[in-house]
Image: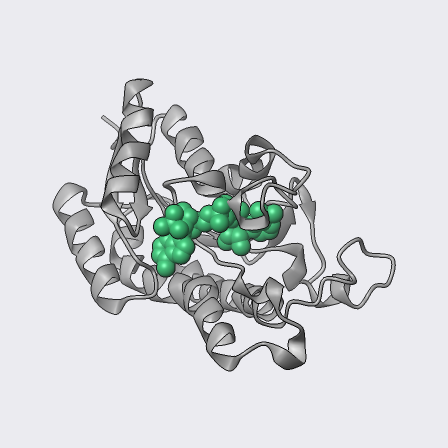
Amino acid sequence: MPKQKTALVTGANRSIGFEIARRLAAEGYRVWLGSRDVGRGEEAARKLRDQGLDAHVLQLDVTSDESVASAIAELNRQTDHLDALVNNAGIADSFTHQPFDEPIEVVKAVYEVNTFGPIRLTQAALPLLKASDAGRVVMLSSELGSLQALLDPQNQFYGINALGYNSSKTALNAVTVSLAKAAEPFGIKINAADPGYTKTDMNGHSGYRTVEQAAEAPVRLAMLGPDGPTAGYFFDDQTLPW
Ligand SMILES: NC(=O)c1ccc[n+]([C@@H]2O[C@H](COP(=O)([O-])OP(=O)(O)OC[C@H]3O[C@@H](n4cnc5c(N)ncnc54)[C@H](OP(=O)(O)O)[C@@H]3O)[C@@H](O)[C@H]2O)c1
């Protein structure tokens, strides 16, 4: 009998992460919703269980070595493999600052969640991903991480110059390429997905895409077959320029 598919989604207690978790669970995955607040995470997991889905909370603050280590230890007690890791948790504190005025502490805090968090967690999850027949890792990036997009005056995001946030996602793209190359010998595929400008708490619900649209590419990349890409950067089904 084939093993039940398993997935971990970070920052899954709300917004895009919750929708990604819901979709993967609806595809038959046992899903752990990473949440730094266990109460908020449990409430979200319960909503999915009430729909008959196999959803569980995992306390996880991606900025903390200790939290990541204990979350992976707990995951190891509950499963012997991980088929999909979706590094979704992110913060956007940079947007209220001009680049020359953005305090370095803010830049560091944004990198801790958006860039170092995915590195920390993906490294820690590697043994469980290797134990899968087809481990998949998805990084929630942004078109604001695309240097080519940000240098193109015709691009809709040309004027959005959030130093910490944009560069944290550019760095995440580089992390995606590096980890994807290192993961290839294990059959693990690692890709970056831009959910698009999506109506969530992150932007005061000013985005024009729904969380359902935003989750589409991350879910597809989390479930890639053996012929799927790795080290790619996608918006919906289009490849984005780095
Ligand atoms: N919305 C957009 O337009 C847009 C566009 C491009 C890319 N993205 C990216 O898509 C991802 C999801 O964005 P969103 O709009 O859904 O954001 P959101 O509504 O602000 O939700 C962010 C999620 O990340 C969690 N989180 C924050 N810091 C964390 C930490 N240290 N450890 C673990 N979880 C943490 C939050 O948990 P709490 O509830 O505990 O705060 C929340 O669950 C982010 O990576 C974002 O950069 C979003």
Residue 43 vertical placement versus 148 (above, below): above
- Is 106 in front, or is 239? 106
Percent position of residue 21, x then y: 39, 36
Q: Nearer the viewer, residue 35 or 21?
A: 35
- In front of the other: 17 or 171: 17
Q: Residue at x 70, y 44 (%)?
A: 238
Q: Quadrant of residue 65?
A: bottom left
- For this rendering, which residue is in front, 214 or 198? 198
Please state, as top left, top right, bottom left or bottom right, where the C terminus lies in the image: bottom right
Residue 69 percent across, percent down from the top left: 21, 62
**Quarter of the view holding residue 184:** bottom left
Does residue 78 appear to the left or right of 211 in the view shown?
Answer: left
The answer to whether one can see residue 111 in this image is yes
Question: Where does residue 122 sit, x and y in percent of width and height?
Answer: 36, 60
**Res 193 visible:** no
Q: Is residue 209 left or right of residue 134?
A: right
Where is 99 relative to 95, above or below?
below
Position of 63 relative to 232 (above/below): below
